[in-house]
Structure formats: C-alpha cells, structure tokens
Image (spheres, helix red, strand yellow):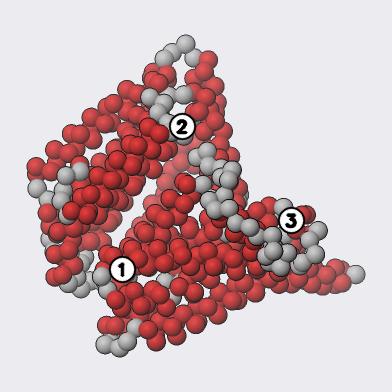
Amino acid sequence: MRGMDKSDLAYRAYVTVVFGLFGFFVALGAVDEAPIGEGTIQWLTGHGSQWIGLGIATVVAAALRSGANGGPLTIDDVDAHHLLLSPLSRHDVLDRPVRKLFLTAAGAAGVLGAAAGELAARRMPGTKTEWVFGAALTGAVVGVLVVGCALIISGYRKRGPVVTSVWMAIIGWSVADVWFNIDTSPLSFLGRIALWPLVGSPVQLLVILAVIAVAVVGFRAVSGVSVERILRRAVLIRQIRFALSQQDLRSLILLRRQLAFEAPRRRPILSLSLRRVAPRFPVFVRDLRSYLRWPTRRITRVTGLSVAAGLSVAGLWHGTTVLIGAAGVLMYLISLEVVEPYGQEVDHPTVMETMPLETGRILVEHLIGGAVAMIPIWLVATGAAFAASRSVDLLASMLGAVVPAAMVSVGAGALSIQRVGSNETAMAVPPELAGPQVLYKLLWPPALATMGIVPVLVGRQALRAGNPVVSPTINAGIFVVILGGLVFGWIRFRDSMFEAAAAGQQEKKR
C-alpha cells in the first residue's frame, strides 16, 4: 500500500511539473522581449516596493483570518482523533505536519517568485540572476511569514475584534507607505527585496530575521491550537477534496464558505421596500436581496479581487500581455461570487420546476441581474487601473469594455456551476471523449472570462498604431457581447435541446 501511495504521489508531482513548465514557457512566449519605458522603471523604483508591500499585507491579512478560523494546519480526521486520544502533547504530535507546512509554503512561494523573476528579467534592466534571486527569496519569506502569522493566531486562539484590529493595522501601515511614498513597513522592505536589481541592498535582508522570529513564535504556538477546530477543518477538507475529484465546483464553493465561517447577513445592508416591484420583476428582486445580504468578508474579497484585476489590466496596458490571463482568472473568480443567486436556483431544481416561468428564462434573468451587478465591480477595477497607470486612454478603453466584460464573466461563472438534475447526461459521451470533455469544462469558463479583457487589448494595439482607442474597443466589445449572448442563449434553451435529443434517441430505439 505504501508503494502505491508513493507511486501515486510521484505521478501527481510529475503531472504537476509537466503542466507547470508548459504554462510557464507559454507565459514566457507571451511576454514582450522589448524593455519597458524609462517612465515605468522610474515608477517602479520610486513606488514599486510600497505597492508590493501592500499586496503582501493583503496576503498576511488573509492568513490571519485563516488562523482565526482554525487554519492553516490541515490533517486527516483520523489523525485529529488520534491527537485527541494521544497521551503526547499537541506540539509533539503536530511537530512533523507543521514543519512540512512551513517547507511546502516556502518552496511553493519561492518557485512562484522565481517564475515571476524570470518574467520580469525579460523586460527589466538587471541580470536574470538578480531578478530570480530577489523574487524567489521574497516568495519564500512571504510563504514562511504567512504560515507563521496564521499559526500564531490559531495557537493563541485570537478571534473577532483582535484579529480584525491586527490585519487592519498591517494593511493601514502599508497603505500609509503607499500614500506618503516612504518605506517604513517591514513588508515594504520585502517589496524592495523583490525589486533587488532596482532598489535592493544587503541591509534590507535584516527583515528576514523578523520573519524568522515570527515563524519561531508560530511554531511554538502550535501547542495551543484548538483540536476541535482542527477536526472540523479536517472533515471539511476531506469533503473539499472529494468535491474536487468530482469537479463539483458548486459544492466546493459552499464548503469553502463553511470552512471560513462565512454566512449571509441576518439583516440586509440596506432596507428597501420592494413590494411593488417584486410581482413584476421577482427574479431581479431576488438577486438584489441576495447581494444586500453579502457578508463583510465576501464584499472585502470581491473588492480585493477587482482591484487586483484592475492592476493586472494596467500591467497589460503597459506591455505585459501575459497579464490578460491573470485579469481573466480574477474576473472569473469574482463571477463565482456574483452568480450566487443562480447557484441557489440550481441547487433546488424541483422548486424551480414548480414556478410558472420556464426554467431557462428564470436562469437567464438571474444572469442578467448578475451582469448588472458586475458593472460596479468592473468600475472598481477601472479605478484601480487608472490609479496605477494614470492613462486616460486606458480609462476610456475599460469603460468601453464594461458591458462585454460583465456579460462573459457572469456567463463563465454560470457554466462552471454543476447543474443538479440536468438533462445533460442524457447525451451519451464516448469514453474516448470523457477526458477532453472534463478538460474543456475546466478551461473554457476562465477562457471565456478572459475574452472580456480582449477589447482593452485591442485598444492598446490601436494606441500603439497611433489610432483612437474608443472605436476599436467598441468594435471588439460588440464581438464579445455576441459571444456572451450565445452563452446566455445556450443556458436559456439547453434543457429544451437535451430533452429533444433524448426524445429523438427514444424514437430511434423504438
């Protein structure tokens, strides 16, 4: 059995490395080899460390929230029961998993940092060794810092106002560095290490000692973790792994919310009287009431993702074409939150069948409501992109792409949610096509969401050619809107098409 486990682990590592290298070299081919402008280099030299520090602060804040929810340590539920019954101390039992967690976080983040350094070296001044060294070291240190902070919060069982005050102070410190253009936060010094060829110096490496101290405190704090929360986390993680194996994204989203203790608000953000509107537009009122009950965590998460998407679009505008994939994936993640009313309808197909409206019409109206909700989210991304680039052309291009991006993003989120009770299984799929079909279902929704960024890319190309950006952006946006309309139409009529196909198969059998 052990031999089988090791061989299975080696096979998974092999597949992961192969696909990771393939994606990395594809990204290398998408990065423009030409150096970036002198203005961008000056901006990175003067402001890059503060912005990177703010990004690290956001990751640390998420780690603190994870520690308050019982993370980041994850063990099997069998091991959790053993921990409850074992006469040994918690530190002795959890020593090996904690060490493995530190090494995994540092190694994974270091590899991602090295890949980012390789990409930066192709367009930035400085040697490849300096960029890879600085980015890899920053990634490894951030990985250790994240795990250490989460273990401290989990070990000392700090929750609620304490955790909120800590992560707000960390983010506020980094925001102050950005606002006043100074480096005072330790996370800003980590940002300087990431930009080693531009602003790095050996003195800044002293911040690593502070990170090591945090890791030591976190390692010692593991003896105080809540075993009950570890057991709850272990059970949920096991269910999440099963949902992943079944490609059940809807269950995965719901389990992740349980893992984070994320529940809707008891009272809506705004109390609106919708009695007169509800009979005429019941679906849209249902969507609005769902959005008004979003918890603070979800609002913060969506806002952060939209800001990150805007910064990615700003990088795309300045020549890093590969960032279109990052922006598309971020918009796809946001859409999974926005299509929550659609997902709730899908979770209760029998209730939907009892309604006087057609099932397809109900689902499409949910998508229209989600597309409307995506518009302010895209405007937040537009504001972040404009703040980072100060480009009026980029602002005009993103405003021209607001409707296409909203439509395809919501369509991508809807396609990812597994339909319960769908007639899709009525059409038999040959075994030879089962694998490509699964791969298609995994890759097509993020690719569809990425299509919403294409009008901005077209606007950039028009600007490089010396032409106005508005007209090409709108023309490309029309094509994306047509694509989104096809997706909406597919969701509207697919049940009817599957029923017709199933009836045709029954007729042939007769």
The residue that appears at 77% across and 54% down in the rendered structure is 351
Quarter-of-image position of residue 28: bottom left
Q: As rendered, which of 98 and 359 lies closer to the eye? A: 359
On-image quarter of the N terminus: top right
Name which residue type carries label 2. Answer: Gly
Look at the numbered disc 2 and give the secondary structure of its residue: loop
Q: Position of residue 440 (x, y in %)?
A: 55, 64
Name which quarter of the figure residue 473 lies in. Answer: bottom left
- List the residue tagged with mark 1: 386
Mark identifier at residue 70: 2
Question: CA gap, disc 3 to disc 1?
Answer: 43 Å
- Is residue 191 visible from the viewing direction of this image? no
Is 422 drawn above or below residue 209 in the view shown?
below
Which residue lies under the disc numbered 3? 349
Does residue 499 appear to the left or right of 184 in the view shown?
Answer: right
Labelled pair 3, 1 in contact (Cβ < 8 Å):
no
